[in-house]
Every structure is written in structure tokens, then in C-alpha cells.
């Protein structure tokens, strides 16, 4: 049983994340999507809300479970006995940050591999930050996020 962990802030999950999750489910037996708790960073959605939104958005995928974790990712990966960390890579601008994280995680745990998956072209420019900005300014976001997230964003912002 090969397990992948896909960690992130997911504030909130968007179609680019979902694209990566769907690809990961084809490659590993179980995919754990895990919301990283960051006490210092306040987001639009609470941790619990993010988890619930991901659960609803991935309910069609049998081998996905949704959790949250606090502290170092390497410790959580060990706790879950996962084989790899999955991250999405959209553009060159992501590369430096992702490279830094992957190498830091590897130096904390030499056995930890990070695997990068690319979303399809139509989702490549998405980020939670930009989706929230468009929603706050009254733009149409139905193309960018699952329905449940669209409704949640509208409610949060109104
Ligand atoms: O969606 P994000 O904000 O790009 O996700 C970043 C995340 C949560 C994967 C990263 O910040 C993380 O792994 N945080 C857990 C704390 C940790 O292990 N930090 C050291 C590794 S860089």
C-alpha cells in the first residue's frame, strides 16, 4: 500500500489543487490531503472549514482522506507512514520555494521524497490568493473552484 501526503494551506481548495489530487489518486493507493495548521498565519477559512471543503470537493474519490497537522511535515509523514510528499508545480515562479522546501524536508529526513505533479494548463494560473481576490471584487469564480467552495466564498465575503 503506497501512501502519498499532499500538504498545503488550502485556503480554500481550488480546481488546481483538485487536479493534482485526482492525478495523485491514479499513482498511489491512498492520498492524504492534509491542511497544515499555521498559528501565525490567519486565513479566510478556519482549519476545520478547509478540511470540510476538501472532504466535500473530493467525495467522488475513494482513496482520498483529509486531515490536518501541526508542526513539521516530516514528523507527520512519519506518523502516517507515508511514502512520498506530493506538491503541485504550476510555473517557474513556484520552483524556488518548492525546491527549498523539498530540500529542507530531505535534510530533516533523508528518506523523504517529494514528487511534483503539474496540473492541466487550464488550472495552471490558479492560486487561492487570486481566487479570493476575484471573489472579493465580485468576479465570477465558478470556473476556478468546486461548487461547494464557490458557495462558501460567497457566504464568507458577503
Ligand atoms: O499551500 P502552501 O502554503 O504552499 O503549503 C506550504 C506547506 C504547508 C506545505 C509548508 O509550509 C509546510 O510543510 N509546513 C509545515 C511546517 C514545516 O514542516 N516546515 C518546514 C518545511 S519547509
Image: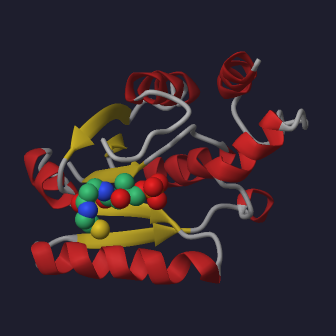
Residue 69 showing in the rendered view: yes
Q: Nearer the viewer, residue 122 or 49?
A: 49
The quadrant of the picture showing ligand 1 is: bottom left
Residue 110: x and y in percent read 11, 79
Residue found 67% across the figure and 45% down from its top: 15
Q: Please, is residue 30 above or below residue 138 in the view?
A: below
| Image-based side of 82 in relation to 54, left or right | left
Residue 27 showing in the rendered view: no
Residue 19: x and y in percent read 61, 50
Residue found 40% across the figure and 82% down from its top: 99
Q: Nearer the viewer, residue 6 or 156?
A: 156
Residue 92: x and y in percent read 62, 83
Q: What quarter of the picture does the C terminus occupy?
A: top right
| Image-based side of 81 in relation to 158, left or right | left
Residue that lies at the very extreme toward the right in this rendered image = 139
Q: Please, is residue 98 above or below residue 62 in the view?
A: below
Residue 90: x and y in percent read 63, 70
Residue found 57% across the figure and 37% down from its top: 12
Colour option used: secondary structure
Residue found 9% across the figure and 46% down from its top: 79
Q: Please, is residue 18 above or below residue 120 in the view?
A: above
Q: Nearer the viewer, residue 69 or 155?
A: 155
| Image-based side of 27 in relation to 136, left or right | left
Tally of numbered discs: 0
Amino acid at each position: 500500500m503506497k501512501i502519498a501526503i499532499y500538504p498545503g494551506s488550502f485556503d480554500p481548495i481550488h480546481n488546481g489543487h483538485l487536479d493534482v489530487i485526482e492525478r495523485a489518486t491514479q499513482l498511489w493507493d491512498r492520498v492524504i490531503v492534509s491542511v497544515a495548521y499555521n498559528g501565525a498565519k490567519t486565513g479566510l477559512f478556519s482549519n476545520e472549514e478547509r478540511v470540510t471543503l476538501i472532504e466535500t470537493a473530493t467525495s467522488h474519490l475513494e482513496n482520498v482522506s483529509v486531515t490536518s497537522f501541526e508542526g513539521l511535515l516530516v514528523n507527520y509523514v512519519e506518523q502516517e507512514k507515508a511514502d512520498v510528499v506530493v506538491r503541485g508545480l504550476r510555473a517557474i515562479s513556484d520552483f524556488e520555494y518548492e525546491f527549498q522546501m523539498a530540500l529542507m524536508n530531505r535534510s530533516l529526513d533523508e528518506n523523504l521524497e517529494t514528487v511534483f505533479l503539474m496540473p492541466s494548463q487550464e488550472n495552471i494560473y490558479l492560486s487561492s490568493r487570486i481566487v479570493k481576490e476575484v471573489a472579493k471584487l465580485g468576479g465570477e469564480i465558478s470556473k476556478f473552484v468546486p461548487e461547494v467552495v464557490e458557495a462558501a466564498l460567497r457566504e464568507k465575503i458577503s
